[in-house]
Image: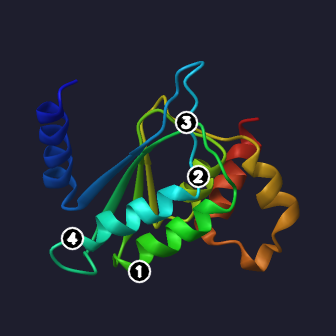
Amino acid sequence: MPLKERVALIKKIEEIRGSTVISFLTSLRQNVPAQIAEDSVRVFFDHLLLLPSRPVAKFDLFLCSNGGSGTVPWRLVSLFREFSKKFNVLIPYRSYSAATLIALGADEIVMHPFAELDRSIRRCLTFSIPPMLVPDNCKALAWRMSKHT
């Protein structure tokens, strides 16, 4: 899809949701690996500095990825929250591994009916994090996943 069409679609999503949208897509193709990595933190920081006003009222991250480094999500979510009052994630297709962790750091997760989060996150929510530290949206997600797996 040409750049002009992509930009028009992003603008349309911004109008419908009343938000600022930035896309984060990594390659899903076989033999063309691309993962969420440490270098993405600086790239996002540079993009967020270009916002005309900060913090924005509502920030949507359009996210599609097979994941990547487990240390990056915390840094990215902290960065997104620094530059926005409300941080949301839009998942059109898949959000695995580190991408799932980014999504769980959002105030709202909006998913297409065919979208997927990583199943392995159930282990993190069930065994690694003390229940009193898990946000309510994560508890609800863990409950839904336990009912459907």
Q: Which residue is mark 3?
A: 34
Disc on the earlier residue, 1 or 3: 3
- Which mark is nearer the camera, 1 or 2? 2
> What residue is shown at x 59% (from left), y 18% (from top)?
30
Three-letter amino acid code at the position of disc 2: Ala
Disc on the earlier residue, 2 or 4: 2
> What residue is shown at x 46% (from left), y 73% (from top)?
79
- Relative horizontal placement of residue 110, taking residue 74 as reference (left or right): left
Disc on the earlier residue, 1 or 2: 2
Disc on the earlier residue, 1 or 4: 4
Above/below status of 15 relative to 50:
above
- Label 4 – label 3 distance at C-alpha: 26 Å
Q: Quadrant of residue 50?
A: bottom left
- Labels 1 and 2 touching (C-beta < 8 A): no
> What residue is shown at x 59% (from left), y 61% (from top)?
73
- Label 1 – label 4 distance at C-alpha: 12 Å
Q: Which residue is mark 4?
A: 51
Answer few, some or many: residues within 10 Å of disc 2's Cα (few below 14, many 20 plus, some between 14 and 19).
Answer: some
- Labels 3 and 2 touching (C-beta < 8 A): no
> What residue is shown at x 58% (from left), y 58% (from top)?
38
Q: Quadrant of residue 20?
A: bottom left
Report x, y in % for residue 98: 63, 51
Disc on the earlier residue, 4 or 3: 3
- Label 1 – label 2 distance at C-alpha: 20 Å
- Which mark is nearer the camera, 2 or 4? 2
Q: What colour scheme was applied to this rendering of the protein?
A: rainbow
